[in-house]
Image (cartoon, rainbow, N blue to C red):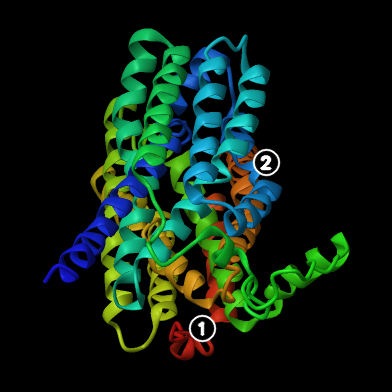
Amino acid sequence: MRGGEPARRTWRYRWVVLGVATFTQAASGFFVQGIGAMGVHLQRDLSLNTAQLGLLLSAAQLVPLAGLLVAGELLDRYDERWVVGAGACVVAVSLGAGSLASGYVSLLLVLLVVGAGYSTVQPGGSKSVASWFDASQRGLAMGIRQAGLPLGGVLAAAVLPVLAAALGWRVTLVAGALVALLGAVTFVCLYRRPPAQSPARDSAPRDSPSRDSAPHDPEPRVSLTSWFGARLRMLREPSMTKIIWSGMSLVSVHSGIGVLTVLYLHEVTAVEAGPAALVLVATQGAGVAGRVCLAAWSDRGGSGRYVCVLACMVAVIAGMSALMTPLGRSPAAACLLFVWLGFFGIGWYGPWVAYLAESAPRGRTGFALGLAMAVNQVAVVLAPPALGLLRDLTGSFVPAWGLLSVITAVALTVTARGGRRSRRPVA
């Protein structure tokens, strides 16, 4: 009985870890997720076109191209508590300094630093949850944890436009800094590793000798080229191929929803800026529900987690196609379509990241998460300004929705084969 009670307390604490990781994710991404909702205010106050607005989102995602790889390696070597906590603190400090920015260029530079700090939060939170939950509940747990990003978007879309309208855009950076700092403090104070896991053991490669078996053997020296090449060989794995294709297409859709929803509703369907921001709140809320529900489905579906990702791609293509028809010019129909796109075009991340964590080599979960997310960053960086520029050049949103539909259709075609065999038991 005595032995069972500590085990039960440990079992219950994983839900605390899940809550902490989810909150830190939402807090760290709070300001960046609200940029699209503030689009009308930022365009007015800083005299921006759509491409420049999209570039603000890209600036926050540029450094993670390399930062996610570094963060992944750090997570395989050190305690997530300090890696994630330090990154969230960088987000908070840089946003606080950004409130003093003199204009658009200064704001871009601030968001570059924000991206550097955020590089640790995304893979770090995913690894912390994956280490506490087994395969039977990992999809649901990952879905809840990954719901942190759109959850932060829901709160940001509801709060930041109001602050920007009443007090100016600089105050929104102060608000973002305070929220990010709260997330950092919460994670550092409450997170701990599972009892059976130690930093040294977790960071050791699967085929390396233990410290007990060879206490005096020095570690072999490996050149930087060999070290990097060994890790990049993960990209050749069939599971990683599916991860990359689907991730890059669907993260482009997510970026497009974030930067274009409010502008589209305001310009095409004549919805005022305030109500349009509320539609983005509902869209992000649907994404929260999607990340949880779709990940839970992947836990119980016998056909594998990746089939759930394929279903999301089909749903996204259908929604984007409908936006390009006269149906997309109706305010009510357009709002419903964006909620649909939120559920599938944001919700896909739950089962996707669970599939990624289960496909990673033993002892390299952190780096595998960082590598796949770094590849995704290419699309995250390019999509917002590219879609904004396409809108500026053509004077229409139809080419942007069409491009996203084509990219998703290509990814669906390339990765659909073998999707039913994608689920792999975890040792």
Disc 1 marks which amino acid?
Ala
Disc on res. 242 = none
- Residue 426: x %, y % from top left: 44, 82
Residue tagged 2:
63
Residue 348 in view in this figure: no
Q: Is residue 375 above or below residue 220?
A: above
What residue lies at 35% left-to-right and 32% top-to-bottom?
Answer: 156
Residue at 63% in and 30% down:
113
Answer yes or no: do the residues labelled 2 and 1 have beta carbons within 8 Å?
no
Q: Residue flagged by tag 2: what amino acid is it?
A: Val
Q: Nearer the viewer, residue 246 or 4?
A: 4
**x, y percentage for residue 402?**
54, 58
Residue nearest the observer in this picture, 31 or 325: 31
Q: Which residue is labeled 1 in the image?
A: 416
Would you identify the image quadrant in which residue 302 lies? bottom left
- Mark 2 or 1: the one toward you: 2
Residue 126: x, y in percent? 45, 58
